[in-house]
Image: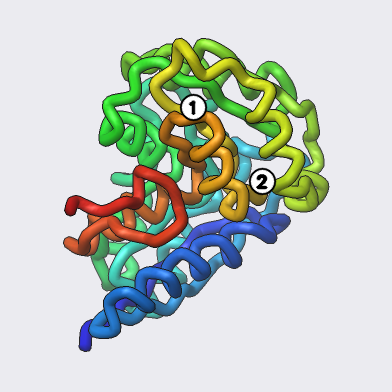
Amino acid sequence: MSGYQVGLVVPSSNTTMETEIPAMLRRREAVDPGVTFTTHASRVRLHQVTAVELARMNRASGRCAAELADARCDVLAYACLVAVMTEGAGAHDRAERRLARAAGRAGHPMPVVTSAGALVAGLRALDARRVALIAPYLPPLTAAVVGYLAGYGIDVARAVSLAEPDNVAVGRIPPQRLAALADALDPTDVDAVVLSACVQMPSLAAVPRVEARLGRPVLTAATATVHQLLTGLGLDPYVPDAGRLLAGRG
């Protein structure tokens, strides 16, 4: 039996990552009874998804890494995609190093992933060079996400912005709305669809249906984060009913 403790740094107003991440890890446990997971979160203040509040949250995230080091977590995920991407090219590498240093100073070094880096890695794992995406952000923040992905050779052919700055409201967007938006996308010239480019926008329930209907791989900030968490732990990135990215190495 192998047990893993997964640490999450989440915005204080986030209500989704602490449901979707454990849900996927429970599915993973069900197909591999020799592996168990627990999740442990530390929160950093965020109300409105604006550049000012995101920058403030980034500056405070080191405290969270130290707290999760106290819990002796095996891996840490910084679960706010846009907060990292707004800091420009290479920001996820810098954030991962910064949080790893904070954990090390607290006495417990551990691997660190970010949702921003996980999305890039997930798209590369799918060999997706041209994508469509749905984001809850105000258009300038969605543009920052598009520009960040472009810096890694990923062309966003179509981006839908829901223009919702209130992070609590984002967590209340029903997955059915995302499914309807995705159904309206033309997938013929894209390699994959990012159903939710945000860790707060609930999407896990819609991933298998949208993937089946569009005939393209569908991933989200949350599924990409789990892919990197499992990979970082040296485990097969397999989670049932969570899209092609989490179909495992076979």
Q: Residue at position x 27%, y 72% from top?
A: 107
192 over 105 or under it: above or below: above
Q: Residue at x 46, y 30 (%)?
A: 215
Type of amino acid under label 1: Glu
**Sequence order check: which comes first, mark 1 or mark 2?**
1
Distance from the alpha carbon under mark 1 to that under mark 2: 21 Å
Position above or below: 238 against 184: below
Q: Which residue is mark 1?
A: 87
Quarter occupied by residue 138: top right
Question: Quick check: 156 above or below 181?
Answer: above
Q: Is residue 194 visible?
A: yes
Q: Nearer the viewer, residue 106 or 95?
A: 95
Q: Of helix, strand and loop, which one carries label 1?
A: loop
Q: Amino acid at mark 2?
A: Met
Q: Secondary structure at mark 2?
A: loop
* Figure coloring: rainbow
How dense is the environment of label 1, judged by Cα within 10 Å: few (below 14), some, or many (20 and up)? some
Side of 133 where 78 appears, left or right: left
Q: Check disc 2 and report the residue beneath it.
A: 201
Q: Quadrant of the N terminus?
A: bottom left
